Image (cartoon, rainbow, N blue to C red):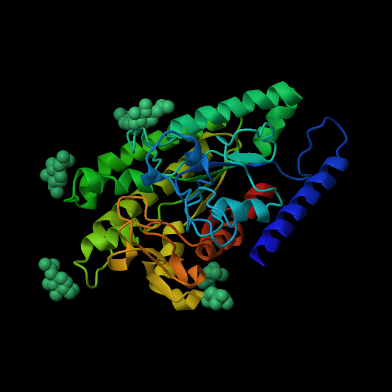
Amino acid sequence: MGGLRVLIYFLVYSLSIFIRIKHCHSSSICLPKKHGGLFIFGDSYFDNGNNNYINTSISVQANYPPYGETFFKYPSGRYSDGRVIPDFIAEYAKLPLLPPYLHPGYPNYIYGVNFASGGAGVLDGTYQGLVVNLNTQVSYFKNVKKLFSKKVGDAEAKELISKSVYLFHIGGNDYSTLLETNSSLLLPHDHQQFVDMVIGNLTNVIKEIYNLGGKKFGFLNVPPIGCSPSIRIRVSNGSTGACLEDLSAIARLHNTKLSQMLQKLEKQLKGFKYSLTDFYSVVYQVIKYPSKYGFKEGSMACCGGGAYRGDGSCGGKRGIKEYKLCDNASEYVFFDSFHPTERASQHYSQLIWNGNHTITKPYNLKQLFQV
Ligand SMILES: *[C@@H]1O[C@H](CO)[C@@H](O)[C@H](O)[C@H]1NC(C)=O
Ligand SMILES: *[C@@H]1O[C@H](CO)[C@@H](O)[C@H](O)[C@H]1NC(C)=O
Ligand SMILES: *[C@@H]1O[C@H](CO)[C@@H](O)[C@H](O)[C@H]1NC(C)=O
Ligand SMILES: *[C@@H]1O[C@H](CO)[C@@H](O)[C@H](O)[C@H]1NC(C)=O
Ligand SMILES: *[C@@H]1O[C@H](CO)[C@@H](O)[C@H](O)[C@H]1NC(C)=O
Ligand SMILES: *[C@@H]1O[C@H](CO)[C@@H](O)[C@H](O)[C@H]1NC(C)=O
């Protein structure tokens, strides 16, 4: 059943690409009629396999069972039982599934490509040496731009780049690693400088892509990371545990500054357009009221061990061999100690794509593709 579904999925996509190419007049490169491609930057929420191809630690990889068991039927490197947010967004935008940039043998990136890397933060220092950091992700985008120019000429490349959407999920790791360097987290107001540094570096990245010709930017703000099972397990002493409020408070501080920064850029940069999804609130609602959204469990992970199954043991390859796996991942918000299930990602994606103004503004992603 699942295998058949995957087969049909790919057949439909191949067919849709074939039809588009058939209706293509100019060069061999042919864009979707109305809009450009989708370029993905970020961390494990978005990584669709890049970390399979870097020399890193298993702690930032998800290319072993039971990852990937529900949709793709193989562990593709996505931190999920199935698809991740960029897979759904590509589908809604009528684009094919985007390849991970580091996957060998994808010379054609006209529909976009995914640069995201599990563990990455905004800062180069976050999991340094283990991840493709954000600045490197941008340097890969530069390579893609050069490739476009070579294939279709500068003018068409410019058009393609300005029509495309650049979607980000990044920042959570910069803050959650604070816990590793300092287990006694400071109160949020003491983190002003650190948050400013993260926002400052993110601003530079956005400006860099803008200077390369990018105009349409999509962002998810940082979710309530203090409520992920991996953090709750630290707070709880094996019984009941709350969220680590201090960590979520830093996320909220980041989110406030992110929103201010984007409003500023919109005024500064001609033609700059963005969509900012209040991912924090969206995720918080689902964690707090799972049954309202059709989930049975909002706090405990489907896969892992210890309190909230938050010990990071999912798959049994990160030091701890024994782990538990739920029967039906779709009933859970979290698949492993940090990452959403496919079903949660689908819920998030629908709101990112088509949410109203309380959730995503000034445009939702659907509108951003069309403006
Ligand atoms: C991969 O990383 C390990 C540990 O950092 C290092 O010892 C090894 O030489 C690296 N291998 C390659 C091919 O870079
Ligand atoms: C860790 O946090 C405490 C306050 O909670 C602070 O006094 C200390 O300087 C921090 N240590 C490091 C290494 O940042
Ligand atoms: C970017 O981050 C580095 C640390 O990785 C910091 O030294 C620098 O000041 C930051 N840049 C901005 C503009 O905040
Ligand atoms: C552990 O959790 C229980 C239940 O929440 C609480 O009563 C107890 O005081 C906690 N113990 C420690 C050492 O935090
Ligand atoms: C798994 O859970 C979802 C959501 O509750 C439900 O729709 C689905 O039928 C369940 N699948 C199985 C095999 O029980
Ligand atoms: C926006 O969407 C959310 C979630 O779908 C809903 O709860 C809310 O009532 C909507 N707000 C408006 C103003 O339509």
Total count of labels: 0
Q: Position of residue 82 (x, y in %)?
A: 55, 58
Q: Position of residue 62 (x, y in %)?
A: 45, 49
Locate the N terminus by quadrant.
Answer: bottom right
Q: Is residue 307 above or below residue 134?
A: below
Residue 55 visible in the shown view: yes
In front: 342, or 142?
Answer: 342
Furthest-front residue in this view: 321
Q: Is residue 20 left or right of residue 270?
A: right
Q: Position of residue 317 (x, y in %)?
A: 37, 51
In front: 122, or 334?
Answer: 334
Q: Residue at x 66, y 25 (%)?
A: 147
Q: Is residue 219 left or right of residue 231?
A: right
The image quarter in which residue 134 lies: top left
The image quarter in which residue 246 lies: bottom left
Q: Quadrant of ligand 5?
A: bottom right
Q: Is residue 325 above or below residue 141?
A: below
Q: Is residue 194 left or right of residue 171?
A: left
Residue 371 visible in the shown view: no
Q: Residue at x 48, y 74 (%)?
A: 295
Q: Is residue 98 left or right of residue 56?
A: right
Q: Position of residue 138 (x, y in %)?
A: 51, 31
Q: Is residue 304 above or below residue 24?
A: below
Q: Residue at x 50, y 36 (%)?
A: 53
In front: 177, or 361?
Answer: 177
Q: Residue at x 31, y 42 (%)?
A: 195
In front: 211, or 102?
Answer: 102
